[in-house]
Amino acid sequence: MYKRVLIKLSGEVMCGEGERGFDRKNVEFLVRQLAQVVEYGVNVGIVIGAGNIFRGEELIDLPHSLADQIGMLGTVINALYLKGILQKVGIKCVVVSQISSLPSIRPIHYDDINLYFDAGYVVIFAGGTSNPFFTTDTAAALRAVEMGAELLIKATKVDGVYDSDPRKNKDAKKFEKLSYQDAIKLGLKVMDTEAFSICGRYKLPIVVLNFFEDGAVLRAVKGEPVGSYISPD
């Protein structure tokens, strides 16, 4: 069992693949999955994307830095929404960010993070890294290391890492376990190289799983086989 984990969520968990905004059924499922982990007694940090609000291809005509800033603000919207729905079911939450002067957002002070966890709060990290040109994967890796996570869970639409897209290739091979070096060498688009670099430097393992598989996140937290396990060795 892991005692402290960071869960990286796609914005699409709020709405469903190819959809926008917030879908009630998806949101209720999201709350159930996170509640399972919280009730198990684990310290939970969350980084969520903004794909249900903005998609990169829609911002292609804008300067890259501006598009990234819009995306970062999208993650703030999702973080506050997630805080609200978790609080509604009795889960204590706090949203923190290095982007200053945002309503209902607290600044990141790492002495405070441990206090939040000790008090039973879920900590939602909003605003990415607060700098353009970095993905939410990199933000997740950075926040995971900073909060002292023992595991980074990347919750996706696919049940692990494959050598090709299993939704397009029925013969795609799934990797039950692989190393960072294998993933990079084989060109597997699991996380970007900056995220791998951070995780590798601090020996942080990653589990990639299908968020929409009921109980998958809890199984990962318990250390049970689920999805694909990516080791730093």
Image (cartoon, rainbow, N blue to C red):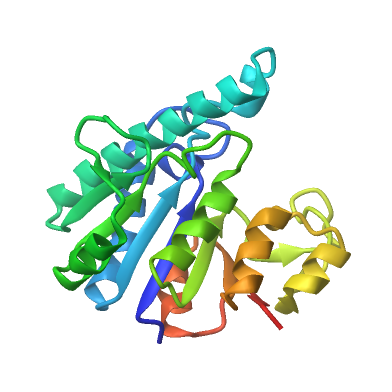
**In the image, is 194 to the left or to the right of 90?**
right
Q: Provide residue 65's location: percent of width, then percent of height.
A: 60, 25
Q: Residue 217 is drawn in which quadrant?
A: bottom left
Residue drawn at 42 percent across, 39 percent down: 127
Residue drawn at 17 percent across, 68 percent down: 120
Q: Provide residue 64's location: percent of width, then percent of height.
A: 65, 24
Work out whether 117 lies above or below 40: above
Question: Residue 228: in sight, yes or no?
Answer: no
Q: Residue 91 is drawn in which quadrant?
A: bottom left
Q: Provide residue 116's location: percent of width, then percent of height.
A: 20, 63
Residue drawn at 80 percent across, 48 percent down: 168
Quadrant containing the C terminus in the rendered view: bottom right
Q: Total number of numbered labels?
A: 0
Quadrant containing the N terminus in the rendered view: bottom left
Q: Provide residue 71's location: percent of width, then percent of height.
A: 51, 29
Of the pair 171 and 201, the residue shown nearer to us: 201
